[in-house]
Amino acid sequence: MVLDWKTRATAAQTEQGESTGDEAISPRAQALGLRTLDDLKLEVLRQRTTWWAGSAYHCPLCDVDFISPQRAAEHVVLEQHPVLRMD
Ligand SMILES: [Zn+2]
């Protein structure tokens, strides 16, 4: 099972309309060099193939952590957020 990250990311961007690039990104994500929503989307796309094999996930928009891919995927589907694998 692979989520359609690209479609979701594009939809999220469209909904936001005129983005200023000032979306709140958690300090934890910024520490990884991810400072914009585009950075997050690219990182998630990069992780796509091994994303489901993780045991630590983080939503940079909510600053919330998940300990299983199931919980993380739930958040992706419900909130349409780019949840990162952190392990
Ligand atoms: Zn979130």
Image: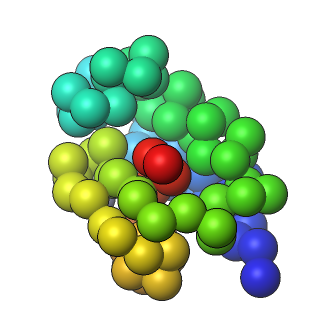
Q: Position of residue 42 (x, y in %)?
A: 65, 34
Q: Position of residue 34 (x, y in %)?
A: 44, 23
The quadrant where ligand 1 appears is: bottom left
Which quadrant is the N terminus positioned in?
Answer: bottom right
- Quarter residue 66 falls in: bottom left
Q: Compared with residue 51, is residue 69 higher up or lower down, i.e. above or below?
A: below
Q: Residue at x 50, y 74 (%)?
A: 69
Residue drawn at the location 33% of the way across and 53% of the way down:
59
Q: How many marks?
A: 0
The residue lying at 20 percent from left, 48 percent from top is 63
Answer left or right for 80 relative to 6. left
Question: As rendered, which of 37 and 57 lies closer to the eye?
Answer: 57
Instruction: State the colouring used for the structure image.
Output: rainbow
User: How far across and down, in percent of the image, does residue 27 sit?
Assistant: 21, 27
In this view, 9 is above or below 52: above
Horizontal side of residue 53 vs 4, given as left or right: left
Residue 63 placement, left or right of 80? left
Q: In this rendering, is residue 22 above or below 52?
A: above
Can residue 55 be seen in the rendering of this structure?
A: yes
From this viewpoint, is residue 81 visible?
no
- Which residue is pictured at 48% across the width and 83% down the height? 70
Q: Quadrant of residue 56?
A: bottom left
